[in-house]
Amino acid sequence: MTQFLLALAQAPGPADIGIVKLDGSDSRLVVVNPASDEEPEWSPDGKKIVFDSGRNGNNDIFVMDSSGENLKQLTESPAKEDHAAWSPDGKSIAYQYEWEGNTDVFVMNADGSKKSRLTNHPARDGWPDWSPDGSKIVFSSERDGRREIYIMNTDGSDQKRVTDSSAECKRVQAKYCNTDPSWSPDGRWIAFNSERDGNSEIYLMRPDGSAQSRLTQNDRVDERPAWSPDSRKLAFSWRTRADAGVMILNVESKTETPLTEPTGYALQRPDWSPDGKSIVCEWFKRPSNR
Ligand SMILES: [Ca+2]
Ligand SMILES: [Ca+2]
Ligand SMILES: [Ca+2]
Ligand SMILES: [Ca+2]
């Protein structure tokens, strides 16, 4: 992230969080804080937004009303907690817990109570998302020597790898291989990003790992796909050394439309409102001469 921010502002600027209406009628900040506030995700009922923030010294997970009011801190440990993901029933939040260089997937009740560990492996595990029926969690792990995508039951049992790009990722010396899985609301697809072709692109596969196909092909870094509620579109982040933004991709036609930027801001890491009308994302201030 630092590279494009250097280019954007000559100094890494911390993110705030804002909402952009897809019809262009409105955009507004809902989190403004000197610390970096990242990775917002809308609750399934549309009433709340979860995100992570470094405002209290290390990353913690926070929840608030989608208006930005009634902020509540859900984690308070000295570990770095981030990548929060709501369960489809809105009762639980899966997240990534980082301590001493290792990360694992944890889950807690949506009020922050009853935290429990789902993965326990010396390699990095994280980037969780839920199946729409609430029975599985898809995540990424480096336990097989590169980052691949895995599925487990929501109690952490039966962890299975569903991608294997060992040959391709070795050939292009990919740092992350396959990561950032996002399960479609209709249950039929998992979108993810992969560096298997030498540059991060957005891909689709069936939840069992079959029928993999590439949706983007360009020199940008494309990452962090998030499904529209009707499972027809993906919002995702792109960045180059000089710029960054959010694209809306029609999955069937593979056409991309840039999400309109609020004046003076670059956007990253989108998530869709459950009514399909708005995107919540990270907002980075652009330098005033642009
Ligand atoms: Ca901030
Ligand atoms: Ca923490
Ligand atoms: Ca681990
Ligand atoms: Ca790309």
Image (spheres, rainbow, N blue to C red):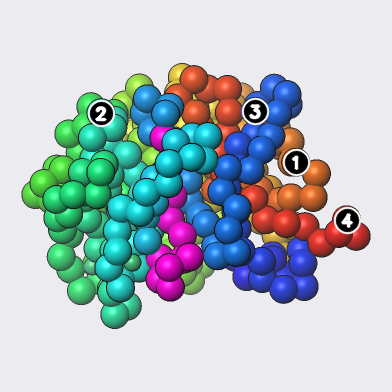
As helix, strand or loop, the secondary structure at mark 3 comes to strand
Badge 3 amino acid: Lys
Task: Indicate whether residue 52 is drawn in magenta.
Answer: yes
Find out if the beta carbon at label 1 lies less than 8 Å from the nearest ligand 1 atom.
no
Residue 182, horizontal then vertical, whole percent: 39, 40
Question: Residue 135 vs residue 283: left or right?
Answer: left
What is the crowding at mark 1: few (fewer than 14 residues within 10 Å), some, or many (at least 20)? Answer: some
- Label 1: which residue? 262
Say which label, 4 or 2, has the lower sequence index. 2
- As drawn, the label of residue 21 is 3
* Label 1 or label 3, whichever comes before in sequence order: 3
Q: CA distance from mark 2 to mark 1?
A: 32 Å
Residue 283: tell me if it is visible. Answer: yes
Residue 157 place in picture, x, y as percent? 9, 49
Secondary structure under the numbered disc 4 in the rendered image = loop
Is disc 4 in contact with disc 3, using a CB cutoff of under 8 Å? no
Q: Residue 180 location in percent, x, y? A: 42, 51
Residue 238, placed above or below residue 255: below
Outermost residue on the bottom side: it is: 100
| Of 139 and 85, the residue lying toward us | 85
Distance in Å between CA atoms under marks 2 and 3: 25 Å
Return the residue at label 4.
290
Q: Which residue is mark 2?
A: 89
Quarter of the image for the C terminus: give it: bottom right
Q: CA distance from mark 4 to mark 2?
A: 43 Å
Q: Nearer the viewer, residue 147 or 3?
A: 3
Residue at x 17%, y 54% (from the top left corner): 115
Q: Is mark 4 within 8 Å of ligand 1?
A: no
Q: Secondary structure at mark 1?
A: loop
